[in-house]
Image (cartoon, rainbow, N blue to C red):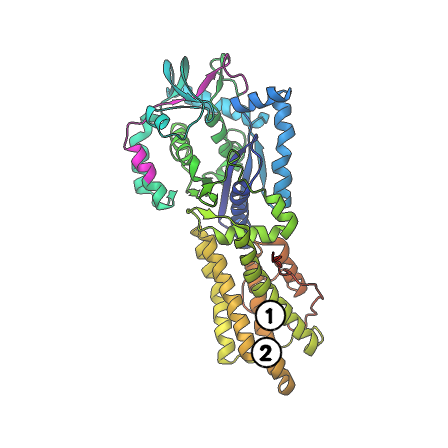
Amino acid sequence: MPDKFYVTTPIYYVNDKPHIGHAYTTILADVLSRFHRELGDRVFFLTGLDEHGQKVQQAAEKRGLSPQDHCNDLAPRFTDLWKKLEISNDDFIRTTEERHKKIVQAVLQKVYDSGDIYQKEYEGLYSVSEERFITEKEAESGQFREIKKIQEKNWFFKMSKYQDRLIRYIEEHEGFIRPESRKNEMLGFLRQPLADLCISRPKTRLSWGIEIPFDRDYVTYVWFDALINYITAPGYLSDDKKFKTWWPASVHLIGKDILTTHSIYWTTMLFSLELPLPETIFAHGWWLVGESKMSKSLGNVINPLDLIEQHGVDAVRYYLMSEMILGQDSNFTLENFIKRYNSDLANDFGNLLNRVSGLIGKYFESVVPEAGTPTPADEMIIAQGRALGEKVQSLLKNYKVDAAINEIMNLIRAVNKYMEVQAPWKLAKTDLPSAGRVLYTATEALRLSAVLLRAVMPEKAQRVLEILGAQNSGLNWGGLKSGTKLEAHPPLFPRIEIEKS
């Protein structure tokens, strides 16, 4: 039976305007999903929106709308962008959907019945911007805004009960929290006293949320609600067969700023429910502009729609996936985007297509020539091509997406160099079959590269395969059929010319 691959993005905050950070995580999940589908694996890819909480309620009031109407109005900003970005998600969940509210209440009741939820009077510092109680140390860090002291009675989840068990789990399961630096960060956090988690908000202060099933005076804390989406969608407590098929998740892809909620809040909730933990929680870095994280308050948020309209969706997907080493921060500059586009896509990938199709058109009437008997120079390209699929597969399974793309581009660069040395345009004048052999080898390497790049650039890579008449070809060398008629085509990636001032 094929392997299963269940990947999630965070559910994005409905009040946010989608930016490069949101696009990056979602494209990353899409690339991994598409690649696993290419391998024949069963895939479930989930993304969605987080729509409850105080800030949503306040924003709705300012607009004179009900919170639900406010969410309904904003949700298409994400769903429309995902369509433009060629995102192939299998489900899109909104926390205001009945299917989700029903499961959140069932989970709360289950955890309450097990004795892991209790009520107490609490006084502490509350960050309105983050919608959670914070410690004195966190308040002093300067990372939290709109801090006020609140005293009220609330419901608490016995998170501390699972502290030692979680430490052991993280230590015993290599690759559970990635990268290693984030694992060490969480272990450091867990070696300090772990407080229990306040999981309710009184309706007198906040009404926009999922009602606590055992106390109608309260709604659920937004994080306890939001995290449950990962088990709602695959059918927890609603479709046992489906849930057994997909859970545990293969990987939760998240930004590093929400690592604590995912690796501590979520895992202890799963322990309480007696459910297995996800296989991997991967916290990637931030996209920076200059040395600053993108943020609305700094006014340095880059809108992915602007880039798509100017340079095409596949160019944006390619840049984001090839530029960031997963786990580290990366700097976005338009200059760097253009440089990578021109070097990798226009000069290397697009130019190779132009060369082979142009020469096959000129000397072979646009019909793929015979492969012939390989020479040592051909064998070097063939060996690199044959090894490429396994190399890329290994790198992607270890979430080294930038390195996997670089391996593919290394083959493209090697073929361009091979073309320069072999000079089939010269060979054609004296030895047409040899020129055909070189062109077959180069075109087959291009085909293999396009199959592997289809996860990253679904539209353009598929177009290459259509031009080569190899839409349904696989990863084995020799998938390009001699005698196939090539399609005429304009340049795949026209160079971006920079206006000189």
Mark 1, residues whose alpha carbon is within 10 Å: few (<14), some, or many (≥20)?
A: many
Kindly state the secondary structure of the residue where label 1 is placed: helix
Q: Which residue position is annotated with label 1? A: 443
Task: Using residue 469 as the reference point, say whether residue 320 is left or right of it.
Answer: left
x, y percent for residue 357: 66, 70
Residue range in magenta is 185-208
Name above or below for residue 115 compared with residue 451.
above
x, y percent for residue 211: 52, 18
- Taking depth in this image into account, of 323 and 459 the one nearest to the observer is 323
Name above or below for residue 219 compared with residue 180.
above
Quadrant housing residue 113: top left
Residue 86: in sight, yes or no? no
Name above or below for residue 163 compared with residue 171.
above
Q: Which residue position is annotated with label 2? A: 437
Q: Does the magenta stretch include residue 398?
A: no
Of pointers 1 and 2, the one earlier in the residue sequence: 2
- Taking depth in this image into account, of 72 and 386 the one nearest to the observer is 72
- Taking depth in this image into account, of 378 and 213 the one nearest to the observer is 378
Q: Which amino acid does label 2 sit on?
A: Arg
Q: What residue type is labelled 1?
A: Thr
Residue 107: in sight, yes or no? yes
Residue furthest front in the image: 501
x, y percent for residue 63: 63, 22
